Image (cartoon, helix red, strand yellow):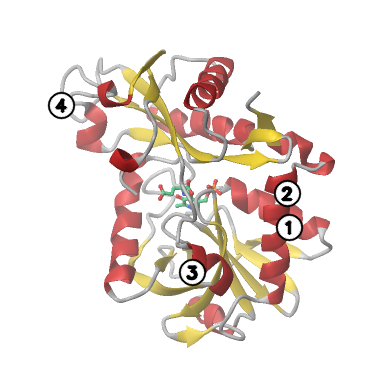
Amino acid sequence: MSFDEMDVSTIWMDGEFVDWDDAQIHVLSHGLHYGTGIFEGVRCYDTVDGPAIFRWDEHLQRLYDSAKPYEMEIGYTPEELTDATLELLRREGLSSCYIRPIAFYGYDSLGVSPGNCPTQIAIAAWPWGTYLGEEAIERGVKVKVASWRKHASSQVPTNAKTTGLYVNSMLAGEEARRHGYAEAIVLDKEGYVAEGPGENLFLVRDGEISTPALSQSILDGITRQSVVRIARDLGYTVHDQATISRGELHTADELFFSGTAAEVTPIRQVDNVEIGSGSRGTITEEIQSRFFEIVEEAPDEYADWFTFVE
Ligand code: PPE
């Protein structure tokens, strides 16, 4: 949905709340030319106890961590960014939404070296429904292994959520969609399974759950961490530093994506090969429904996952 069709009016930018239409930057900003920005994607859920941001502290920590390799100074404390975000959600009256903090090298001079370009920072929030479509959550999606490989972790810091790195995601995802698939799976430089363009990947086989290792060019997804915890709490064995070959995708009993935007989305086909029964698997369904139950009920055992807006 276009932002123009949404009822959102404010963005927090460089320390101030500004009108949505005034949240502008100069066309000669460093981040636009060289992809030198870092960002987060966070969801706020309308829980039975009121709106609450899911795993805010972990997302905030990852934002500061992402800034490190670029020597980018986020000129605000975690407390200031938290206050700004909570105030933004209250002002907008948003209960269930997506939150996008972004920091980037701004406007001063051009040249690859950021020189004196200031770090600019903004936080926006808007309603965002299911990532790959409502039907995807129940039926699962068809995915294509992309011809594009992930950056090697020796080429770029793959654990930093950097704007520029998403050209790889965009190429992989659009290639898949051009061929009639909903999403891509991207292999790492060695050809092992890494992740989706905007999701981590899980594989179920013989009742055990595996997900690629952090060394395999993946983002250390916070939903990934949540799924690992949920699955273990449900009694499953989870191999969270697995190496998965392309062929193992086809022989999996179940596959699913995890991500803030994608939440828990089953995968029913890879390159036209049906996975398991060709629909949402039973373990996927169990983890998925537990995930949705947790974000709806904010139960005591997961209390530290929620930052309440009020
Ligand atoms: N890998 C990648 C490459 C990625 O972008 C995401 C999030 C994940 C894994 C899952 O991480 P986490 O959200 O912490 O569980 N992708 C974000 C961007 C989506 C977009 O289209 O923009 C997201 O889900 O917010």
Numbered marks: total: 4
User: Residue at horizontal 78%, vertical 42%?
Assistant: 302
Q: For the C terminus, which image quadrant?
A: top right
User: Residue at horizontal 63%, vertical 31%?
Assistant: 57
Q: Is residue 169 left or right of residue 47?
A: left
Name the kind of residue labelled 4 in the image: Leu
Above or below, 279 relative to 44: below
| Sequence-first tag of 1 and 4 | 4
Q: Residues within 10 Å of mark 2 (few under 14, many from 20)?
A: some
| Sequence-first tag of 4 and 2 | 4
Instruction: Give the spatial CA distance, label 2 vs label 3.
Output: 32 Å
| Sequence-first tag of 2 and 3 | 3
Q: Is residue 244 visible?
A: no
Name the kind of residue labelled 3 in the image: Tyr
Q: Is residue 293 left or right of residue 51?
A: right
Whether residues under marks 2 and 3 lie with C-beta atoms below 8 angstroms apart, the answer is no
Nearest-to-viewer mark from 4 and 3? 4
Whether residues under marks 2 and 1 lie with C-beta atoms below 8 angstroms apart, the answer is yes
Nearest-to-viewer mark from 2 and 3? 2
Instruction: Give the spatial CA distance, label 4 vs label 3.
Output: 38 Å
Whether residues under marks 1 and 4 lie with C-beta atoms below 8 angstroms apart, the answer is no
Instruction: Give the spatial CA distance, label 2 vs label 1.
Output: 6 Å
| Sequence-first tag of 3 and 1 | 3
Nearest-to-viewer mark from 1 and 4? 1
Q: Residues within 10 Å of mark 1 (few under 14, many from 20)?
A: some
Q: Which numbered dot is residue 192?
A: 3
Q: Which numbered dot is residue 290?
A: 1
